[in-house]
Amino acid sequence: MVVRTSSSPSTSTPAGEADPAGALARLRAASPLTQCITNAVVTNFTANALLALGAAPAMCDIPGEAGMFAGIAGGVLVNLGTPTAEQRDAAREAVSAPTPWVLDPVAVGALPIRTALAQELLAARPAIIRGNASEILALAGVGAGGRGVDATDAADDALDAARALAARTGGAVAVSGEIDLIVDAERTVRVPGGSALLTKVTGGGCALGAAMAAFAAVAEPFEAAIAASAVWAVASERAASGSRGPGSFAVAFLDELAAVHPEDLTGRAEVTR
């Protein structure tokens, strides 16, 4: 069930309320500038996904410019997939700006440099944390991490860890899985559906983090995370229905992102406890 509300980015909503359809309509109207400090493997796919969604991507990850650019962006993604020394410094600059930002703690727990950086950035209170269950558990300090970018835990295994992180940051936490789990300190929503082919395309999850950053420019964090997950579920299901495999799916997914209408998101999120 989705309980509709006329919330804006600066308006808090009662427990369980979110309007992903309204968030998508606002995103398309605003085309928010979305800064991505992301990994080298997914830059092109992430930019194309944001364009298809209706946002304006900018891959500005140079120290000396990243903080300045974050000040004019609508939302910022910090993805730790390939955290070079330059990207680490750029991330530190960007999260100091008064702009909502998303932390994607790729492979945290499994590797030491990114794990230390994630803990440092966590203190800057991301609006949204997005990761798989193993990454969320590791970030919360109750797990060792998965197998690189692959989760070895189910989304619901990370529910308590996600809630603890949300309470610590004051934002939302999105746990990706067969059923996406989105929480803040008080609310829990599950977004079912989507296609497993997303796991066969490099950037499927990383681009979702960028989409959450774009939505964070036009919605409060909890609603932004729900809206992005719902769009991903709808678009991936439709893309998979006409695809022969990962290659054709990747192209079709971009097409379907552009084709999703706000009304397509009705009923895609389930309020739970």
Image (spheres, helix red, strand yellow):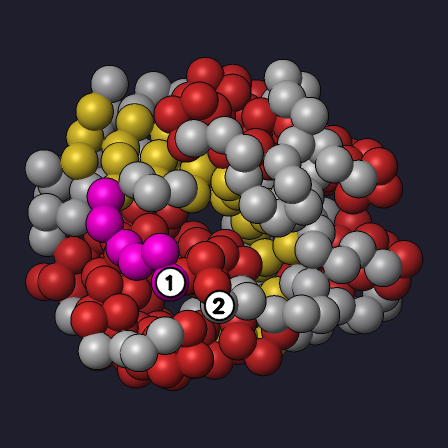
Location of mark 2 (residue): 201
Q: How many marks?
A: 2
Report the front residue among 75 and 155: 155
Residue 181 - label: none
The residue type indicated by label 2 comes to Val
Look at mark 1 in the image and give the residue it sits on.
197
Name the residue rendered at 57%, 45% in the picture.
150
Q: Amino acid at mark 1?
A: Leu
Q: Position of residue 30 (x, y in %)?
A: 35, 72
Q: Is 159 on the left or on the right of 87, as rendered?
A: left
Name the spot of residue 251 as percent of width and height, x first: 38, 83
Start and end of the magenta stretch? 192-197
Magenta: predominant secondary structure element? Answer: loop
Q: Is residue 168 inside the magenta stretch?
A: no
Inspect the magenta stretch and tell me whether residue 193 lies in it: yes
Give percent across and percent down for residue 8.
Answer: 29, 49
- Identify which residue, 262 or 65, lies in the foreground: 262
Kindly check if marks 1 and 2 are in contact, taking CB atoms under 8 A apart as contact. Answer: yes
In which image quadrant can residue 222 be found? top left
